[in-house]
């Protein structure tokens, strides 16, 4: 049996749209992407594209930078730790759900 999948077009934002949605200047967003704080891809024409989740990440970066006075290297570490915490919390919830199920016997 042959399974065929329909192509899925991901929603993405160009540099200007992502910067506008983030509330930052496009040059700052490009710099954050150069520092690997925000994921982006470059197409063959040289345009940068961002995921639709990029504005939320940029806003978090700006809050960490302004409120805690963290430099960009520190922000990268904090973001990695926050993503790891989210992953572990998800695993903990799965384990807790398994414990709440009644045994088969």
Image (cartoon, helix red, strand yellow):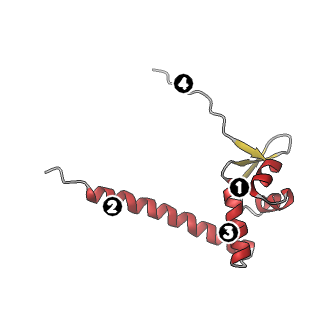
Labels 1 & 3 near each other (Cβ < 8 A): no
Whole-percent x and y of residue 24? 80, 60
Residue at (17, 50) in percent of width and height: 104
Residue at left offset 18%, top offset 54%: 103
Q: Secondary structure at mark 4?
A: loop
CA–CA distance between discs 3 and 4?
A: 39 Å
* Cα–Cα span, label 4 and label 1: 33 Å
Earlier residue among tags 2 and 4: 4
Mark in front: 2 vs 1? 1
Q: Nearer the viewer, mark 4 or mark 1?
A: 1
Disc 2 marks which residue? 96
Tag 2–tag 4 contact (CB < 8 Å) = no
Q: Residues within 10 Å of mark 4 (few under 14, many from 20)?
A: few
Left or right, 4 with respect to 34, comes to: left
Q: Residues within 10 Å of mark 2 (few under 14, many from 20)?
A: few
Q: Residue at x 57, y 67 (%)?
A: 82
Q: Nearer the viewer, mark 2 or mark 3?
A: 2
User: Residue sitting at 70 percent across and 70 percent down?
Assistant: 63
Q: Which residue is mark 1?
A: 55
Which callout, 2 or 4, points to the residue nearer the camera? 2
- The answer to which quarter of the image holds residue 70 is bottom right
Query: Element under label 2?
Result: helix
């Amino acid at each position: 049996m042959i399974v065929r999948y329909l192509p899925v077009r991901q929603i993405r934002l160009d540099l200007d749209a992502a910067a506008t949605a983030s509330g930052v200047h496009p040059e700052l967003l490009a710099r954050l992407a150069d520092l690997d704080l925000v994921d982006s891809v470059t197409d063959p024409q040289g345009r940068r594209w961002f995921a639709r989740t990029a504005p939320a990440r940029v806003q978090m970066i700006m809050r960490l930078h302004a409120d805690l006075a963290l430099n960009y290297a520190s922000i990268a570490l904090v973001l990695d730790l926050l993503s790891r915490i989210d992953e572990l919390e998800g695993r903990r919830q799965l384990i807790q759900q398994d414990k709440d199920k009644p045994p088969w016997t």
